Amino acid sequence: MSRGGGGRLALALALVLSTVALPCSAAALKVGFYKGKCGLVDVESVVASIVASRFSKDRSVVAALLRLQFHDCFVNGCDASILLDGSSSEKTAGPNSSVRGYDLIDRAKAAVEAICPGVVSCADIIVMATRDAVALAKGGRYDVQTGRLDGKISLAQNVNLPSPSMTVSQAASAFARKGLAVADMVVLLGGHTVGIAHCSLFQDRLYNFDGLGNPDPTMDPKLAAALRARCPQFATADNTVNLDQNSSSALVVDSSFYKQIVARRGILQIDQELALDRLSKSLVATLANATDFAARFGRAMVKLGALQSRLPGEIRSSCRAVNKRS
Ligand code: HEM
Ligand SMILES: *[C@@H]1O[C@H](CO)[C@@H](O)[C@H](O)[C@H]1NC(C)=O
Ligand SMILES: *[C@@H]1O[C@H](CO)[C@@H](O)[C@H](O)[C@H]1NC(C)=O
Ligand SMILES: *[C@@H]1O[C@H](CO)[C@@H](O)[C@H](O)[C@H]1NC(C)=O
């Protein structure tokens, strides 16, 4: 081989190596990534204790974190881009409406930074904290992979979350673009077994769904009447109702959400459609009586957590801002 060829080869090799060395949000994930990375301290239990103390005061933290992980992972992968402040960052986009839990992530981040600064990513904190919250809400405990980097870009215009009035097949296409199958989507939407929705996001189903003054015919008329009382047509306040209408399990991560949608008691249009569309209804019927919902949900959350961006990443020192000079 000529010297020139060898030079080109060396250059190519250097390029490959530098690309590999360049920290990228698409890092190799594994269970227990932080083991031994923070002295003898178990990073996962530091996060878990912050979540447990919040949960003991406010069980709605479970819903807050589940939605936070979905919104983070679905846009640019799980890179904590949703946490970045800024006048046009992701959290300012319409579908953010009422995403919560930012303060809890700040607390967990402060706790791990105090012990080993610059080691634990905000993206991993979201995923670990959500796992802990699900377990506390009786949803079962699943192992999460860690080793993510935090992204440096967060733009409202990149927020491409499905809307609640999409059909199942439209929503399925949005999930498919992320590499998630219909079955993953159906199980992940089981996240709506906790939490609340604002009237403004399903009001159209209650009053004039067909343009002729009739409510959505797929909704149980008794539920529609109750919701009309809770969500007056010309109200100024935007009230909330539970996404899981089984009042004894509204704060529990379980499969009763599926029983509710089979009984035509879904709140969001997409939730109700899951029980009716031929793409999803047989899995919904299975899940309504499933004894292994927790295991299925855990596997789907791990899949959601594996979505990654290929953009450069870092370990942020504040979850709300990219590092200076990086
Ligand atoms: C097609 C996909 C999805 C759509 C269209 C959708 C839509 C919505 C909407 C409109 C709300 C109500 C927000 C509000 O009124 O403030 C909501 C709440 C929520 N979503 Fe979803 N969602 C989807 C998937 C998911 C997934 C995959 C998860 C988690 C695994 C999730 C977890 C939650 C939770 C926990 C809440 C309640 C939040 C709270 O109480 O603060 N959603 N979702
Ligand atoms: C979420 O989006 C709404 C509507 O675009 C905006 O008014 C609100 O300030 C945003 N919330 C956050 C936390 O940025
Ligand atoms: C309501 O929730 C309780 C407690 O989790 C459960 O035992 C019951 O089967 C649920 N019922 C329906 C109709 O969803
Ligand atoms: C779940 O099982 C119960 C009891 O066997 C049955 O009555 C109900 O129809 C089942 N639900 C669904 C959605 O298959």
Image (tube, rainbow, N blue to C red):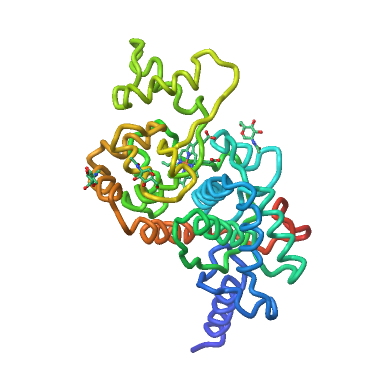
- In the rendering, at what x and y percent does residue 228 appear? 44, 19
Left or right of residue 204: residue 12: right
Task: Tell me residue 239's x, y (percent).
Answer: 55, 26
* Quadrant position of residue 324: bottom right
| Image quarter for ligand 2 | top right
Classify residue 115 as left or right of residue 254.
right
Whether residue 244 is situated above or below residue 37 in the rendered picture: above
Q: Quadrant of the C terminus?
A: bottom right
Name the residue located 60 percent from the left edge and 68 percent from the top edge: 44
Where residue 274 appears, x then y in whole percent? 31, 39
> Where residue 110 sits: x, y (%)?
74, 60
Viewer-proximal residue among 168 and 15: 168
The residue lying toward the viewer, choosing from 306 and 264, is 264
Q: Quadrant of residue 121?
A: bottom right
> What residue is shown at x 62% (from left), y 52% (from top)?
56
Left or right: where 297 falls relative to 73: left
Q: Residue at x 65, y 42 (%)?
A: 89
Viewer-proximal residue among 265 and 159: 265
Examine the rendered structure and indicate whether residue 154 appears above or below residue 243: below
- Taking the view exactly as shown, the residue that stands out farthest to the top is 212
